[in-house]
Amino acid sequence: MAFGTDERTPVSDAVAEGLRRRGLEVEELAVGEPWPLVGRRVGEAVAGGRAEMGVVLCHTGTGVAMAAGKVPGVRAALCVDAPTAAGARRWNDANVLALSLRLLTPTLAEEILDAFLRTDPDPEELPLVAAVEDPERLGSAEGR
């Protein structure tokens, strides 16, 4: 799991430890770096196949989500609750989870992480997900 945070906090520490506790190997790619670099490094690791998924954190979560999402092949989702995280995986096949250091407690971050990691993409949604990278596919996805 690719991991990055622009600031080490109790929330970021809880997320990294939660990933390890779930048996995942955590590659800390950017810790304490500016948020654009955090998002970009994690996004590149996911898009490049070095990691299946990634988790990024910054004050609001918005900046790292935007930076990661600029990398082709990355579908970053800013999630502030478990249902949103599950939906991001189910309907959007999100491969990078973005979290807010300001809004979340370690407990809430764990709930979001559980939902994200335990939810699989819905195969029926994959044509729409593919249309994110290739809008020409949208015509065939709409006709399903």
Image (tube, rainbow, N blue to C red):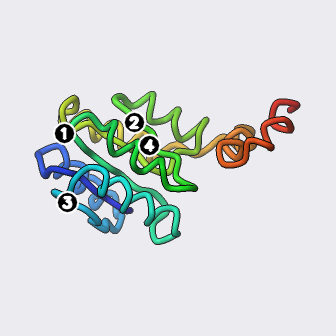
Residue 61 in percent (x, y) is at: 30, 38
Q: Is residue 126 above or below residue 29?
A: above
Q: Is residue 65 left or right of residue 106?
A: right
- SS at mark 2 in the image: strand
Give the residue pinned by disc 2.
78
Circle 1 crowding by C-alpha within 10 Å: few under 14, some 14–19, many from 20: some
Q: Nearer the viewer, residue 35 or 143?
A: 35
Q: Residue at x 34, y 36 (%)?
A: 62
Q: Which residue shows up at 31% across the image and 40% down it?
A: 99
Q: In which quadrant of the rendered view does residue 65 lie?
A: top left
Image quadrant assignment for residue 126: top right
| Contact? badges 1 and 4 (CB < 8 Å) | no
Q: Is residue 91 left or right of residue 13?
A: right
Q: Which mark is residue 98?
A: none
Q: Counting residues from the N terminus, which is met first, the one under dot 1 or under dot 4?
A: 1
The mark nearer the N terminus, 2 or 1, is 2
Q: Position of residue 77 (x, y in %)?
A: 45, 39
Q: Which mark is residue 31?
A: 3
Disc nearer the start of the sequence (2/3): 3
Numbered disc in front, either 4 or 2: 2
Q: On the image, numbered disc 1 is attached to which residue?
A: 106
As helix, strand or loop, the secondary structure at mark 1 comes to helix
Instruction: Tell me the quarter of the image containing the C terminus.
Output: top right
Badge 3, how many Cα within 10 Å: few under 14, some, many 20+?
Answer: some
Which residue is identified by label 4? 116
Q: CA distance from mark 1 to mark 4?
A: 15 Å
Determine the residue located farthest toward the bottom in the rendered image. 50
